[in-house]
Image (cartoon, grey):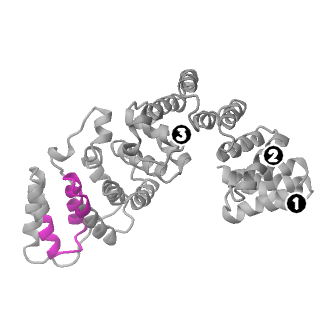
Amino acid sequence: MFFVPISEAVTRGTSDTKSRLKTRRVPIVAANFAAFLLTFWVLPSTAQQPPQFDDLSRQAATARDRGDLAEAIALYNQAEQLKPDWAEGWFYLGLLQYSTNAYQPAIDAFNHLLQLQHGAPPALALRGLCEFETAAYDDALRDLEEAVKEGAANQPRNEQIIRYHLAQLLTRASRFQDSQAQYQFFAAQHIDDPELQVGLGLAGLRVPLLTKDAPPADQPLYQAAGTAGFALLAGDTQEADTQFRQLFARFPTAKNLHFFYGFLLFPHSSELAIDQFRAEIALAPDNLESHAMLGFTLMIAGRYAEAEPEAQHVLAIEPDMEMAQIALGRSLAETGDIQHATDLLNTILKRDPDNLEAHMGLATIYTRTGNREEAYREHQLCRSLAK
């Protein structure tokens, strides 16, 4: 049976949030993380054990239990040379190497494990964290995103460190909306940490950097923006409004600051969000994302005639920007240019077949044109996608 007694030297906990975030190994190698591994796969061994393997595996476990990590690593390596298909050994070898900051050897161990147990979420998460430390950021993003999708962040002690690194990687990849969704977890938990604030500030201001790479001169802006953003994400709208207004006075020319506030306001009040997107455009008329969000938000608010020119402005420069296509397509569906609207919305669906907004636009078009069968089909698709 795959038993997981990890030494106190490796699993020692902490009540300090900042320490939990910055000390990579504390949350991720806790005993409950290794126990969580058991919920994903069983490690049967029907092959005959090579000579000396049993002795080596017992010695490795003993060394691991008493906290002699160097000895345990050496013994696990010897055992794996005798039995390369020993999945449990590869897991512990990678875990212990990760715990000693030997990230590349840990990646190699998890590669072996994932060849034996394809797609195991905890192994993907650990490999992703190691890849982050070796600056293999694209690989880390792939592994951590897949690990979260498969449930590796379901344990509270693991969720913080996994989501924190994933949020940074998403920001670095310019996937700012996805990054902010990861920071939402920390806001819901009311976790207050300067590095988290800088991270959310970078995502909100659309700066594709890891927190460690943020220029020191700009960190006050990023941290203040993140602090205000966390207040709104945590539901304190009055405090968020106060902080954002102080930010506008303190950093009157900061790019995307009004955009960030508008984006956070959008789910709560389209009218307030519209004001912020207009303020951003007044400061930076060439900010296409703000024009696109303004057009989209005006469309959501039912102000179709105002939405059209904003969306058209964006598409004249970036014809494939999906948000502007949706804003224009749905607005045209309401104002009468049915053929252009249909073409735009179908173009979106060729690229993104499950786009709810595009299907809603087509449902409106087919209803208006009396195509009952297609209208019914689109309405059913909308209900299914909205679940």
Amino acid of disc 2: Pro
Q: Residue 236: horizontal and vertical position, in percent? A: 54, 24
For marks 1 and 2 on the same chain, the one whose residue lies earlier in the sequence: 2
Q: CA distance from mark 1 to mark 2?
A: 18 Å
For the residue pair 157 and 357, the one nearer the viewer reads as 357
As helix, strand or loop, the secondary structure at mark 2 comes to: helix
Amino acid of disc 3: Gly
For marks 3 and 2 on the same chain, the one whose residue lies earlier in the sequence: 3
Residue shown at the point (20%, 61%) measured from the top left: 93
- Which quadrant of the structure image shows residue 91? bottom left
Q: Residue 249: horizontal and vertical position, in percent? A: 57, 23
Identify the residue position indicated by label 3 in the image: 204
Q: Residues within 10 Å of mark 1 (few under 14, many from 20)?
A: few
Return the mark for residue 339.
Answer: 1
Residue shown at the point (29%, 44%) measured from the top left: 27
Would you say 348 lies left or right of 108 here?
right
